Amino acid sequence: MTAEQKLRVLIVDDELLARQRLEDLLAKKNEVELIGMAVNGPQAVEAIRSQAPDLVFLDVQMPGLTGMDVVREIGPESMPAVIFVTAYDHYALKAFEVAALDYLLKPFEDERFEQAFLRAVKTLELRQVETMTGRLVTLLQGREDLEQQAAAVAESPPAYLERIAVEMRGQVRIVPVKKIDYITASGPYAELHVGQDTYLIRERMQTLEDRLDPSVFFRIHRSAIVKLERIEALLHSAGGDYAVRLKDGRRLQVSRSRREALEQRLGLTL
């Protein structure tokens, strides 16, 4: 690939938002030509064979034909440079790391995309795609292990959220859950309160409650979830209403039905 040639890129992902996210990031790069997008494995195989892209962003989890099925179908020796995209942060990532293959963990930040992209460009410039062939073989050889671990992950309870993707002015911001102070309901949306910042996401409070670590967060009201360590005091009025005061002075109402459980969590009862 010379300086005059553009990097021909193919996106393969069955999720519309994931494809749009990669498309938006690649659109900022003058040296890239997006030659197409495939929404499933068979389309990916056809596009790779017919269009011979330089680089493929390849989703790992797709119905019917997975990302690794695509590699097997094409053959590791015939694959272009590839960056895997995955939502799994348990079994698959270990395999990619062992094989020294790059990957993006959904949802990913712009900086992480940039790292993976530049690494792929360097691989192409140094003509090291052949080296990647051996890495893909290593990955495929461990495929049975991966599938067994994938099944175990599917049968086990979902991991607690560690980060939440927030769309803001055409960009996706990644909010680490550990930085959230509290969450409040706002109609069909939820507001994530992080210090002085507030981020709006379209998600039900019940879903968030189920996906957050209960040892860290507690739902004090149908419209409020609070990080326990942010609570400074539990307040009650003569009328029997309860509230918590957070360390920043903010007060949030506590449902009477949740007061006793909250007191237990705060160690206020024996």
Image: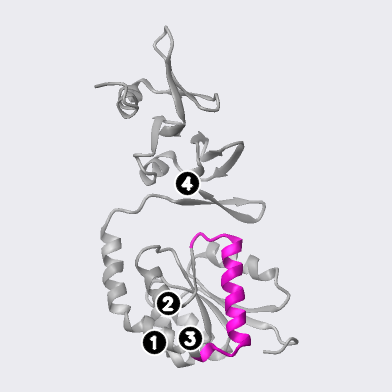
Q: Is residue 169 above or below residue 53?
A: above
Which circle marks residue 238 in the picture? Answer: none
* Mark carried by residue 132: 3
Magenta-colored span: 106-130
> Along the polypeptide, which appears first: circle 2 or circle 1?
2
Element type at marker 1? helix
Q: Badge 4 local density, few (<14 within 10 Å), some, or many (20+)?
A: some
- The residue closer to the viewer here, 89 or 266, is 266
Q: CA distance from mark 2 to mark 4?
A: 29 Å
Q: Is residue 260 left or right of residue 48?
A: left
Tell me how far mark 1 sits from mark 4, CA to CA.
36 Å
Q: Which one is earlier in the sequence, the residue at label 3 or at label 4?
A: 3
Give the mark nearer the N terminus: 3 vs 2.
2
Q: Locate residue 163 relative to residue 219 in the image: left or right.
A: right
Q: Which residue position is annotated with label 4?
A: 177
Residue assigned mark 2: 67
Mark 3 to mark 2 CA distance (whole Å): 16 Å
Residue count near mark 1 (Cα–Cα under 10 Å), binned few <14, some 14–19, many ≥20 = some
Circle nearer the viewer, 3 or 2: 3
Quarter that holds the N terminus: bottom right
Residue ID for mark 1: 137
Counting residues from the start of the chain, the first of labels 2 and 4 encountered is 2
What secondary structure is marked by label 3? Answer: helix
